[in-house]
Image: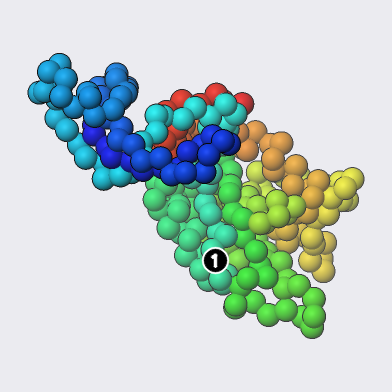
């Protein structure tokens, strides 16, 4: 691989720009030789294909010393509702995610579909009451499309979970009183509406349904490794 590079000196004793030409020989993803134009005329490399990098900087692969590889992959395996500008768009994104994941709103896969990062204050089809924040959504907003698929969707601040009735059936019986440090929204008859705040979200996060299946974890790890390589990380230390 051949490259002509111009850079500024990195030493503290000069500020002059120092043009130089770098010539590197790479094979199977590894740098074998690094030198100047003298390597260009070396007979040992006469038959090696040349690639002009057009003055771009070439780096070796980076190592991330503290990475959460599986968490990165699972972030791609979870539904992302952060860009939704309406409740209608939330349902559209959820429907697309369920379809692309090979799931069905009518079938319980044995685990919670999680993710979310929704923000009802961004929804244009929801009206605020006076100067207060826009009202939280309810299970009824999800039940028509996902009657049996348990959804446990985090709010953008991670302090709330929006659940449908399928998910609430999984964690039943739901406590009649709020857990310490948490709150369960209820309707006029005392039934949970599907909104769980702070420590109340542990009804979902500590449930066995919150454990991601092995097949999903394997896929997530593969997706994460591909993303690392695409961004120049060739090795990571999983934290």
Q: If the image is split into quadrants, where does the C terminus sit?
A: top right
Q: Residue, x 16% and y 20% (percent of image)?
A: 42
Q: If the image is split into quadrants, where does the N terminus sit?
A: top left
Q: Residue, x 18% and y 27% (percent of image)?
A: 40
Q: Residue, x 21% and y 40% (percent of image)?
A: 52
Q: Position of residue 191 (x, y in %)?
A: 78, 60
Q: Picture quarter containing residue 61?
A: top left
Q: Position of residue 64 (x, y in %)?
A: 53, 29
Secondary structure under the numbered disc 1 in the rendered image: loop
Depth check, front residue: 135 or 176: 135
Compared with 193, 127 (above or below) is below
Q: Position of residue 203 (x, y in %)?
A: 74, 43
Residue furthest to the top in view is 44
Depth check, front residue: 62 or 37: 37
Q: Is residue 47 visible?
A: yes
Q: How many marks?
A: 1
Give left or right: position of 161 versus 146: right
Depth check, front residue: 83 or 22: 22
Q: Which residue is mark 1?
A: 84
Give left or right: position of 27 versus 95: left
Compared with 188, 170 (above or below) is above
Give left or right: position of 185 versus 208: right
Residue furthest to the left in view is 47
Q: Is residue 213 visible?
A: no
Compared with 85, 146 (above or below) is above
């Amino acid at each position: 691989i051949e490259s002509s590079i111009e850079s500024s000196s990195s030493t503290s004793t000069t500020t002059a720009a120092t043009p130089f030409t770098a010539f590197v020989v790479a094979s199977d993803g590894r740098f074998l030789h690094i030198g100047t134009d003298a390597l260009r005329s070396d007979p040992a490399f006469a038959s090696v294909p040349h690639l002009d990098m057009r003055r771009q900087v070439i780096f070796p692969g980076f190592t991330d010393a503290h990475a959460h590889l599986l968490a990165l992959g699972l972030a791609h395996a979870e539904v992302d509702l952060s860009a939704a500008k309406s409740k209608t768009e939330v349902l559209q994104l959820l429907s697309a995610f369920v379809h692309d994941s090979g799931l069905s709103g009518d079938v319980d896969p044995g685990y919670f579909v999680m993710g979310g990062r929704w923000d009802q204050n961004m929804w244009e089809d929801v009206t605020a009451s006076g100067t207060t924040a826009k009202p939280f959504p309810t299970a009824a907003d999800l039940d028509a499309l996902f009657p049996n698929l348990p959804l446990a969707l985090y709010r953008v601040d991670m302090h709330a979970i929006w659940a449908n009735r399928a998910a609430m059936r999984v964690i039943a019986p739901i406590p009649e009183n709020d857990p310490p440090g948490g709150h369960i929204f209820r309707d006029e008859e005392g039934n949970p509406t599907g909104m769980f705040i702070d420590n109340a979200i542990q009804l979902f996060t500590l449930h066995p349904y919150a454990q991601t299946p092995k097949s999903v974890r394997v896929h997530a790890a593969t997706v994460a490794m591909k993303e690392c390589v695409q961004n120049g990380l060739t090795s990571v230390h999983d934290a």
